[in-house]
Structures are given as C-alpha cells and as structure tokens.
Amino acid sequence: MDFVDQPDRDIIARITNGDKDLYRILMKRYASLVFHVVQRYEKNSNQIDEMAHEIFLKAYERLQSYQGNSAFSSWLYRLAQNHCIDHTRRRQRYNDVFTEFPDDHSHEMYSDGQSSDDNITTGEQMGQLQNALERISESCSIPLLMKYRDGMSYEAISEALDVSVGALKVRVHRARKELKQYLELPI
C-alpha cells in the first residue's frame, strides 16, 4: 500500500502501531518546515542539519503524545520552535559561564545604543506580546508567527500547515485583531 498520499493521522496511527518505516514519509513531508524554523535560530549549516535531525528524533519519540487536536504540522512547528529556543538558551548559558571580559569592556558588550530604561521597556513589551500570543488559539497564532516572525509567504505556510491560503489569511487577520485587543487591555 502506498502511504505517500495518506493523511498525517493515518500515517501516525500506523507508526504508533509499529510500522516505524512510515516515519520517513512525515520527515520528507515536513523537512522544509523544520529547516525553515531552525534557520531562524541558527546560521551554521552543519548545526542546522544537526538540529533538524534532533527535532525529528524528538518528534518521533513524542509521537504518542500527539493528540490530533491540531494539524500535525502545527504540533511539529511548535516542537521545532521550542527545541530551537531551548538550544539558544543553552548556548547563551554556556557562553555566559565560559566568557569573561574585563570590567572595562563589559559596557561595550551590552551597549547597543539603547539606555537601560529602553531595554527594560522593550523587555516589558516583549513579555506583554508573549502573554497576548499565548491567549490566542494555536490555529491562529502559529500562522501569524510564521507570517510575521518567520517571514514566510502564505503559500509556504499553506504548504507547511496543509491549510488553504484563504483560511490562513482569515486566521492571521483574526489573530492580529485578537492580539490588538489583548495589547490594548489595561494591566
């Protein structure tokens, strides 16, 4: 039986029931999505390949936890994004521990032309934005992030999430509208 044209849910059901070779179909289907996410966080091509491999391995190990409440592509996108964020944090911690600068140069490293008050305000705004994004449904927030943060076209998002371009435009519009409402609420 040819599973290449089968829906993700059917393939996942077969994989979780022991037909592990079918995972290659999901990897081929979503390689561009995973690589696109990784490239937003990493520029080294060897590291990109390694991180993509780690993401697919993690997805395979967690495939049993996929509930089917959202599209598999949304679930995989979220997993890839979280993996990249964790990787970035680990790298920053590693660099913080092993990088020491003399005190007279530390101000140069952290100064990017903004005052510390500007940095605090920017951090607060990012926190408010993150909180607002968490209040929006995944079906709307993920296309919004893919469009504006990742710079993907509607066509690319449509292919990655297996949703029509028209439906994506509606979801992005809805997410922007909800985001605006949440950000305008007094705290």
Image: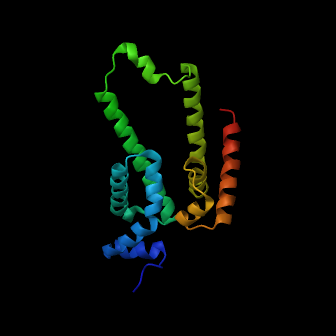
Is 18 on the left or on the right of 74, as rendered?
A: left
Which residue is the extreme one toward the bottom?
Answer: 1
Q: Across the whole image, how many numbered discs are drawn on residues?
A: 0
Kindly identify the residue that appears in the image at 46 percent across and 72 percent down: 8
Residue 162 shown left or right of residue 105 in the figure:
right
Q: What residue occupies the far top of the structure in this picture?
A: 104
Quarter of the rendering containing residue 18: bottom left
Residue furthest to the front in view is 45
- What residue is drawn where x is 61% and y is 55%? 140
Residue 135 sits above or below residue 108 on the image: below
Relative to residue 130, is residue 137 depicted above or below? Answer: below
- Coloring basis for residues: rainbow
Q: Tell me where residue 34 appears, x and y as whole percent.
A: 44, 58
From the top left corner, tell me how far across and down residue 36 is, in percent: 47, 55
Q: Where's the N terminus, which quadrant?
A: bottom left
Spot occupied by residue 175 in the image (x, y as percentages of width and height): 65, 51
**Residue at image location 45% in from the left, 64% down from the top:** 30
Q: Quadrant of residue 171?
A: bottom right
In the image, 83 versus 18, the foreground residue is 83
Q: Which of the pair 166/13 is nearer the observer? A: 166
110 vs 71: above or below: above
Residue for point 46% across, 61% down: 32
Along the line of sight, which residue is nearer the eye, 130 or 5? 5
Quick one: quadrant of the C terminus?
top right
